[in-house]
Image: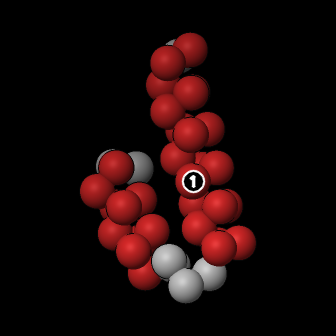
């Protein structure tokens, strides 16, 4: 998934810290998998 999609979703979820944290967690996990991949 592209970063733009994550950031777009992040803007939609800014009112929900829990959802935002989950989204950031997915983003970092995805980036980490790219790094070690």
27 is higher (above) or lower (below) than 35 = below
The residue furthest right is: 18
Q: Is residue 34 above or below residue 8?
A: above
- Residue at 36% of width from left, 61% of height from top? 7
**Count of marks overlaid on the render:** 1
Residue marked by disc 1 = 24
Location of residue 24 in the rendering, given as x and y in whole percent from the top left corner: 57, 53
Instruction: State the residue at coordinates (71%, 72%).
Output: 18
Spot occupied by residue 1 in the image (x, y as percentages of width and height): 40, 50
Asked if residue 25 lies left or right of residue 8, the reply is right
Looking at the picture, does residue 32 appear above or below residue 6?
above
Estimate the x, y position of residue 2 in percent, counting from the top left. 33, 49
17 or 29: nearer the viewer: 17
- Extreme-top residue of the structure: 36
Say how the picture is coloured. secondary structure
Q: Residues within 10 Å of mark 1 (few under 14, many from 20)?
A: some
The residue positioned 43% from the left and 81% from the top of the image is 12
Q: Identify the image quadrant of residue 16.
A: bottom right
Locate residue 11: give its quadrant: bottom left
- Where is residue 35 shown, x and y percent of the image? 49, 18
Work out which residue is located at the far bottom of the displayed protein and give it.
15
Look at the numbered disc 1 and give the secondary structure of its residue: helix
Image-quadrant location for residue 8: bottom left
Give the answer, above or below, for where 9 lies relative to 36.
Answer: below
């Amino acid at each position: 998934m592209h970063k733009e999609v994550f950031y777009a979703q992040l803007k939609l979820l800014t009112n929900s810290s829990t959802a935002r944290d989950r989204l950031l967690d997915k983003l970092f996990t995805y980036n980490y998998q790219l790094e070690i991949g």
